[in-house]
Image: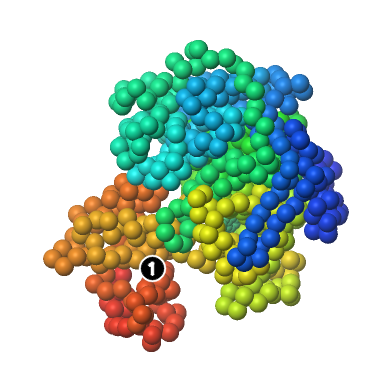
Amino acid sequence: MKDIYEPAADLIANAHIDAAGYKEKYAASVADPEAFWAEEAKRLDWIKAPTKIKNTTFAYPDVSIKWFEDGELNVAANCIDRHLETRPDQTAIIWEPDDPQEDAQHITYRDLHANVCRMANVLKDLGVGKGDRVILYMPMIPQAAYAMLACARIGAIHSVVFAGFSSDALANRINGSQAKVVITSDGAPRGGKATNLKDNVNQALLHCDDSVQCLVVKRTGQQIAWRSENDIWLHEAEASVADTCAPEPMNAEDPLFILYTSGSTGMPKGVVHTTGGYLLYAAMTHQYTFDYHDGDVFWCTADVGWVTGHSYIVYGPLANGATTVMFEGVPTWPDASRFWQVCEKHKVTQFYTAPTAIRALMGKGAKWVEGSDLSSVRILGTVGEPINPEAWTWYNDVVGKGKCPIVDTWWQTETGGHLITPLPGAIPTKPGSATVPFFGVQPEVLDAATGEIQTQTEAEGVLVIKDSWPGQMRTVWGDHNRFVKTYFADYKGYYFSGDGCRRDADGYYWITGRVDDVINVSGHRMGTAEVESALVAHSAVSEAAVVGFPHEIKGQGIYCYVTLMDGREPSDELRAELQNHVRAEIGPIAKPDVIQWAPGLPKTRSGKIMRRILRKIAENDYGALGDTSTLADPSVVDDLIANRADG
Ligand code: WT7
């Protein structure tokens, strides 16, 4: 395995940015952020161009982040209308359905405009206006993108809830954002099976205000239960609306969307992104990280329920007038060649996916790749968790045939777009490293315990960012204090990512994973506290502690220590019941891999659970349990080791 991979000469020659260009532009971006971002802001169409560029402070507790604060623009106009003059008949979205037998759709910018305007008019008819919240709970169909853009067009704030989340999780988000409307579909086909999304919405709405309306897209035509006159078919509502709708002028700092994400404590928080800075950052990173050129076909395999889908299926590509692929299916159905068949069929030039998918496909063998013509593919990308060098090398050799640079993009729901990533024509890559910062991003490594800044190049510690970038989240919906506490209280003056990292002698960053109580399961972020609270909500459970453990395909699996109520006996039936209970409370991605019965949990004398020890036991690494002398009852550790469950 090589340590470092240089981009090919022809790729460098055609790239937006080469090595010298990166150095120069990066230096300019940190030397004078005001001037740099004022210039970059010109890539958007402003109704009123901003004169105030950056007004940000990370000073605790007065954290405040504003970009382009006197500018006005509309996101949908930037993603659609401005392309109508230059590329009305270019395909904006290629939609590839779950079933390869069903026809793909090519939606032009002109079609996109009409569809988005119609949906915007329907939303207006339902009483949705500027600042109102709309929940999207949808399959990967074009209407999901239309709905996002329709909200943006009228100034409503969307919150997409991943369709794999349970009705309880959905209800929490509807209530948390006080949404007026939920947009969903009858069914959601994935991997040849259809989930009844409308049923889940009906369940959720039992716990919500009666006034919440539900707009339903017909996708499968399956039988669904109608609730009341507050349920509306989209196609019926659209029959009587115009296909034009004037975009609402929005302030750059008006919220564009809320996206709920897990943290180390409490319930998921609503990450708020705003209009100007977010769009600019999504567009710019999309262009440079993927070296996107006119005529390319860009495919990000994420779901729009995650930030990756927001920034790199919808907003970034469409702001750039790109052709973006939207895929409804899964990598392994009808068989493990599906991704590569889609690449061949649509002549994909950039392919962006997650390490968990790469590992799963690697496990099926190279023969599933070899049957497809991947000669159109120029750039490969990965996101969501650290990629192990074996998977990186397989991706490079088998998928990329050694000719496609791999961009390992480190970022977060909170960051809006890539913060640390190679640029394909500029930065040699190393398997497993996200490499170097994007323009305007100033990472630092701090000593985790003392918070001291590590000034030498080679360093290890926690990853923080020194100054704001335009795509940064602005607040937690309804709880600014939680925003300040979560990201700015631990290391004063910095944005704290929650990740650990190492910086090597070349200044390359290697993300080592979360240092907080967040685990990363198949690239999906989960708070251990959420799984714990789902477990203790079961009548048999008195106490639970949840940690991550290494998992071959998923990256991390979910390992639960469960103490039962007096009088309840451990059994395989109860174990399965608890697994299904968590699945029902949160969603299939949260189903525990391992449940170990724990008569007691290792606690300090003050009652704090020592997760460090639980992690080590779950990892099967007892040699390094560390100091257990502060435990109230050290013998519980021996019991947990003796009765360790097999993952
Ligand atoms: C966490 C953020 C950003 C979209 C997907 C996940 C981990 C993300 C990488 C990477 C190593 C990564 C981090 C981060 N992560 N990308 N390239 N290398 N780790 O977004 O759900 O907000 O999760 O995912 O731990 O903090 P998210």
Res 19 visible: no
The percent position of residue 626, horizontal first and vertical second, equals: 44, 82
Seen at 40% across and 48% down, the residue is 589
Q: Residue at x 69, y 60 (%)?
A: 57
The number of numbered discs placed on residues in the rendered structure image is 1
Q: Quadrant of residue 340?
A: top right
Q: Residues within 10 Å of mark 1 (few under 14, many from 20)?
A: many
State the residue position of label 1: 618
Q: Quadrant of ligand 1?
A: bottom right
Which residue is more in the foreground, 382 or 477? 477
Q: Position of residue 219 (x, y in %)?
A: 43, 23
Residue 364 seen anywhere in this rendered image of the structure? yes
Residue at position x 19%, y 65% in the image: 565
In this picture, is 291 found above or below 503? Answer: above
Q: Amino acid at mark 1?
A: Ala
Is the residue 98 above or below the residue 17 in the image?
above
Q: Nearer the viewer, residue 78 or 499?
A: 78
Q: Is residue 646 left or right of residue 548?
A: left
**Relative horizontal placement of residue 365, taking residue 416 as reference (left or right):** left
The outermost residue toward the top is: 240
Residue 242 is drawn in which quadrant? top right
Q: Position of residue 250 (x, y in %)?
A: 66, 36
Q: Position of residue 133 (x, y in %)?
A: 50, 37
Q: Is residue 539 left or right of residue 419?
A: left
Ligand 1 within 8 Å of the CB at mark 1: no
Q: Residue at x 40, y 71 (%)?
A: 611
Determine the residue located farthest toward the bottom in the rendered image: 629
In this orientation, which residue lies closer to the viewer: 398 or 75?
75
* Vertical side of 413 occupied by 203: above or below: above
Judging from the image, what secondary structure is the residue with disc 1 in? helix
Q: Is residue 158 above or below residue 422?
A: above
Colouring used for the render: rainbow
